[in-house]
Each structure stands twice: as structure tokens, then as C-alpha cells.
Amino acid sequence: MKIAILPGDGIGPEIVAQAVKVLNALDEPFELETAPVGGAGYEASGHPLPEATLALAQAADAVLFGAVGDWKYDTLDRPLRPEQAILGLRKNLGLFANLRPAILYPELAGASTLKPEVVSGLDILIIRELTGDIYFGQPRGVRECPDGPFKGQREGFDTMRYAEGEIRRIAHVAFQAAQKRDKRLTSVDKANVLETFQFWKDIVTDVHKEYPDVALDHMYVDNAAMQLVRAPKKFDVIVTGNMFGDILSDAAAMLTGSIGMLPSASLDANNKGLYEPSHGSAPDIAGKGVANPLATILSAAMMLRYSLGRAEQADRIENAVKAVLAQGLRTPDIYEDGTRKIGTEQMGDAVVAALAK
Ligand code: NAD
């Protein structure tokens, strides 16, 4: 099994090195190959997504990605900026399903802005459609308003649309993910107002016939936003469109209060995927050895579960992370009185040590 390792910029190389250490400790026949991406890609070959890096990602069974971006590239033309590498990888690899778990380990309940009893033990998964919806729908632009009270004035407009096949494939990903968890799926829509999302609801309901073991319910997005902060533990898996998912997944991430803990996966139709922490390249702390590598290590666990068919190894890593937190070991971003502050490398070593137990 070939894994493309793309560390990127800022803290990317430091945190990815810890995940690689953990992967190597599993004693599996993985072939790991590293390539530059983002600002590092631009430095190496004048483009944030060098051809050789894209070719490696296409040939691999899965991609482990760190983070890209640095303020020093802000003056480059937009197509040359580090963040373009992510869009290029999504597009070229056909990554249409974004999976973002929001997990709050009981030991970190104090990090959330919500009351501990509301979030302690939280374990939900948000699945966001990533390549359709109003973000990509055509036509779009600025034109002369053709009707209504503002007729003749300039207006901005976008198009919300979802094809049946687009909804079916994300619904299958969601039902299958629910089957691997608590077998409950909430489809979030705005069917009361939007034709696109009435259609979405109808198609998800139809796909449900193939997954009778999963309980499906539907929720309007405004109510879902409210329930996410009122009683987030009631959810298991949430599936929704690109725009609603963009907003809800960030809200869910902040329930946990610790950006350094959150992994993510972006999958194609064959479960090949790109795995990365939900945070950015954190240039403010790069090179200081203090970044939290757990989001990246947990992203590697997701890679084992969703792309490499090694669920038992994924469980081992996740249990090792729980054990390390239970030992009271913390990087500065999750440090509290009464725990022990350690650096990036020590955290990686602690997870490897916990794996061995
Ligand atoms: P960021 O997520 O990099 O950092 C936000 C804050 O969280 C910073 O204070 C940072 O120190 C802290 N932080 C982030 N990850 C951490 C970790 N693992 N451990 C401890 N603290 C951590 O977001 P930003 O500052 O808005 O962006 C910085 C750069 O990252 C920009 O160039 C941006 O474009 C890029 N970015 C990249 C990605 C990606 O690669 N997928 C995502 C978001 C932002």
C-alpha cells in the first residue's frame, strides 16, 4: 500500500513527522513517499502543486497531508499561492466527500466554550458534499437585475444546483459511514424553502431503502445549527450539502475548543482519500516544537479506516491517543493546570509508546 506524504508548510513538516512515526510503528507493509506541496512546492519547482507531487498523489492509495500557507506568499498571484494546491488536489483526485469528526475526549471537556455536561464525550461525524452546490453552480456573476423592485440595477447572483447522481453518491458515503458507527444519520436540508434541497431530501430518502439498518431523519439547517450547540451529543452522523456543511462543520469543530485535535478526510468514489488536520499551517508557532500533532495522527487513523481497510489499526491509534490524554500529557494548546506540558516530538513519542502497550 502506497501512501503519499505531503507535509507542506509551517507546522506541516513537524506534525506529519509524528504521524509518520506512528505509521511506521504499526509494522505494516506501507510504502511511504514524500513530496513538496504548497509554499514548499512553489520553492521547489515554481508551483504550489508540482506535477510530480500530483502524479504521486494520483498513484498512491491514500494521501497524508499536513497544511499549506505562509504570510510570505500573500503577494504571489492567486494561482501560485500555497492554498491552490488543496483545490488542485480535490479537483484532480475527484474528492467529493468531506468527513469531519468532532470528538471531545472527556479529559479535554474544559477546553470547550460550552458546559462540560453538554459536550463531554461528544463524538459526531459531519459529512459535507465538497464539489457541488451554490459554490460551483453556473451561471453566476454580476448582471443587470431583470425583474422585481430593483429591476435595472446591478445584482450579484449564484446558482444552487445538485444533480441526482451527486446526491446519491454522497448519501451512500454517509449511510456506509453510519453503518460503521451508531447507525444513525441526519440529513440536513432547507427543503421548506429551496427546490434543490427538497430534491436532496427525496433522493436521500430513496437511497435509504438500501440501508434499512440505519435510522434516517431529516432536519432543516437552521434547526441543525441550534441543536448542534443545544444538544450536540444527540447526533451520530450528519450529511449535508457544500454550503451548509461548510458552516456546520466549523461550528461543530469549535464545540471541542481545540483545533489541534480535529482530523479530516476527503474521499473519492472508491474511498481513496486525502487526510489532513482541520487546522492550517500555524506559521506563528512553526519551528518552535510546540504544535499539537494529534489531529494529524488521528487523520492517519482515519486513513487506515476509510482508505486502507485497517480498521483495527485505526482503533489502536485512537486508543493510544486516549491513553496519552489520560496520562495527563498535553501540548501547550490543550494544557490545563494539573497536566504535564510537552512538545510536538514528545507527543508523537508518547503515542508510539502507548501503541506498544
Ligand atoms: P491556523 O489554523 O493555521 O491557525 C489558527 C490558530 O490556531 C493559530 O494561533 C495557530 O497557532 C493555532 N493552531 C493551529 N494548528 C495548531 C496545532 N496543531 N497546534 C497548536 N496550535 C495550532 O489558521 P490561520 O492562522 O488562519 O492560517 C495560517 C495559514 O494556514 C494561512 O496561510 C492559511 O491560508 C493556511 N491554512 C491552510 C489550511 C490547509 O492547509 N488545509 C487550512 C486553513 C488555513
Image (cartoon, rainbow, N blue to C red):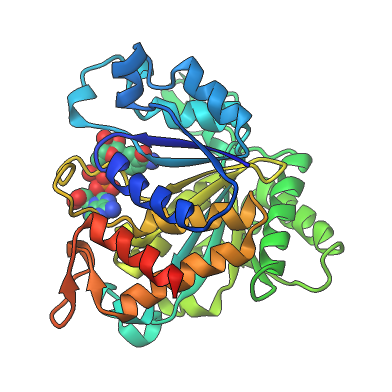
The reply to whether residue 44 is visible in this rendering is yes
Relative placement, left or right, of 330 versus 133 is left
> Which residue is rendered at x = 55% and y = 30% of the image?
57
In the rendered image, which quarter is residue 44 located in? top left
Quick one: 137 or 49, which is closer to the camera?
Answer: 49
Taking the image as shown, residue 297 lies to the left or right of residue 136, namely left
Name which residue lies at 21% across and 64% down: 331
Ligand 1's image quarter is: top left
Asked if residue 228 can be seen in this view, the reply is no
* Residue 111 point in image, percent of width and height: 25, 73
Report the residue that reaches farthest toward the right.
209
239 left or right of 145 in image: right
Residue at 30% x, 40% y is 13
Residue 162 image-quadrant placement: top right
Establish if 236 lies above or below 252.
below
Front position in the image: 108 or 190? 108
**Residue 163 location (% of width, % of height):** 74, 38
Q: Quadrant of the N terminus?
A: top right
How far from the left and from the top, in percent, is residue 94?
63, 33
| Left or right: residue 341 compared with residue 99 | left
